[in-house]
Image (spheres, rainbow, N blue to C red):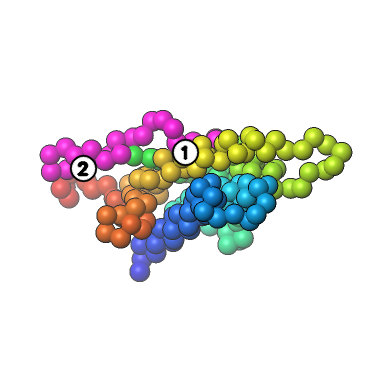
Amino acid sequence: MDNDTGNLQRYIDQMVLIKKRQEVIWNILSRKTTTGFFYSDIEICVLEIRKIIELIAMGSLVSNMEKYSTIHEKYQNAWNAKYIFNDIERINPDFYPKPIDIKKTGKYDEFVPVEKNYLHKKDAIKVYDKCSAFLHEDNPFKTSHDVSYYVKNIPLWDSKIINLLNRHTVRIYDDCMYFISMRSEKDGNPHGAIFKAISKNEQ
C-alpha cells in the first residue's frame, strides 16, 4: 500500500469515528439515551463535538503527513486541534476540508462548492475553545456556564459539521486531493478516492 493510499484509509478511519460520535449526540438529543442527569447529557454532547473537531484536525494531519512530519518529529503526539490547524496552515494554507455538492453535467460529475451553513475553520477553533471551557467544573465563586447556550448551539454545530463533511474534498498538495463521501451508496459508510491532476499529454 503506497503512502497516498495508506493515508487515505487513515483519513477515512477518522471520518468513521466522527459518524459514531455524531450518533451519540443524536441519541442524546432525541432522548433515546440519557445518563439520567440533564447536565451530564449536555456535557457528553459537548465532549463529542470537541472530539469531532479533533478528528477533523487529525484528518488534516493525516492528509498532510509528509510535510507535517518535517516540522514536527513527534507528530504521533499531536492532539490539540487548534495547534494542529495552526501548524498545518503554515505548510498547506489550503488544508481545510471543502464541502461540495455533485452536479451531473453530461457524462461527467461536477463538484460545486457549498457556500453556506458549514463549519468554517475559524468557527471550528471557536467552538473547540467553547467546548473545552464547558468541560471544566465551575468555580463556586464565579458565574457558572450558561447551559442554555450549549443546549441551543449543539444541534447547530452538529448540523454545520454535517454540511462540512457530507461530501468534501481535501487538498493534499498542488496536484492531488481526496474526495470523501460520508455515506456511500454501497454500504452507508464513509468512502474516499484520490484525485490527481493530469497533464494534457496524459488526456
Count of marks, rendered view = 2
Q: Is residue 3 left or right of residue 133?
A: left
Q: Element type at marker 2?
A: strand
* Residue 126 inside the magenta-drawn segment: no
Residue shown at 29%/51% (left/top)? Answer: 195
Residue shown at 41%/30% (left/top)? Answer: 116
Q: Which of the 4 image quadrants contains residue 94?
A: top left
Taking depth in this image into account, of 167 and 62 the one nearest to the observer is 167
**Residue corresponding to mark 1:** 160
Amino acid tagged 2: Asp
Q: Is residue 25 left or right of residue 144?
A: left
Cα distance in 3D space between marks 1 and 2 = 24 Å
Residue 84 shows in the view: no
Taking depth in this image into account, of 114 and 200 the one nearest to the observer is 114
Work out whether mark 1 precedes mark 2 in sequence or the reverse, and give the earlier one. 2
Q: Is residue 33 left or right of residue 8?
A: right
Residue 145 shows in the view: yes
The part of the chain drawn in magenta is 101-123
Q: Residue 71, percent across and down?
A: 57, 53
Q: Residue 159, percent across and down?
A: 46, 40
Residue shown at 65%/47% (left/top)? Answer: 38
| Picture disc at residue 109 | 2
